[in-house]
Image (tube, grey):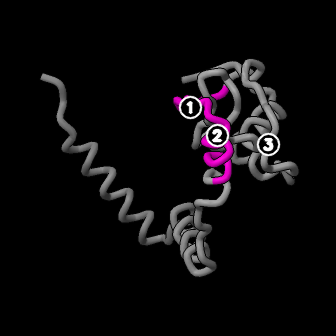
Amino acid sequence: MQMELARIIIRKRVRKNLGDLASLMDSLRRHGLLNPVVINSKNELVAGHRRMESAKRLGWSMIEVRIVDTEDKADLVEMEIEENTQRKNLTTDELAEAYLRLDKLRHPSFFSRIWRAIVSFFRRLFRRRPA
């Protein structure tokens, strides 16, 4: 569900320092919001402060939100903690492999380009035509 950024209330947060938002802003600009911010039924921010602040700095007026059905303060703090601790970064090897795959997709070899052109040609040739 979309919500106006101005309607989201930011109360006392666990994270005090949002850090450098430049790379997150760049990601939002290029790919959009991949994970919605989380609010409660009173429109109070539960998780996603950095995403929200980045969106504001980009000039967005609306943002995708997910609403959780709790107003219990302990639950809200626990969810904020979980949001910021229960993730696993890619290992160095995983990250290196991912960048190699990305590079191959963005810069395919000569033979890969030829193969893709052949496949594309036959797909167009045998594509079903409306009756």
The Cα–Cα distance between marks 3 and 2, rounded to whole angstroms, is 10 Å
Magenta residue check for 16: no
The residue that mark 1 highlights is: 70
Which of the pair 92/115 is nearer the observer? 92
The residue that mark 3 highlights is: 13
The residue that mark 2 highlights is: 76
Name the secondary structure under disc 1. Answer: loop
Q: Residue at x 67, y 37 (%)?
A: 73
Residue type, label 2: Leu
> CB atoms at circles 2 and 1 under 8 Å apart?
yes
- Whichever of labels 1 and 3 marks the residue nearer the N terminus, that label is 3
Compared with 69, 33 (above or below) is: below
Residue type, label 1: Thr
Which of the pair 123/90 is nearer the observer? 90
Instruction: Give the magenta part as a residue range.
Output: 63-81
Name the secondary structure under disc 2. Answer: helix
Q: Residues within 10 Å of mark 3 (few under 14, many from 20)?
A: some
Q: Is residue 21 left or right of residue 92?
A: right
Percent position (x, y) of residue 90? 59, 70
Magenta residue check for 72: yes
Q: Is residue 39 left or right of residue 101?
A: right
Q: Residues within 10 Å of mark 1 (few under 14, many from 20)?
A: few
Residue type, label 3: Arg
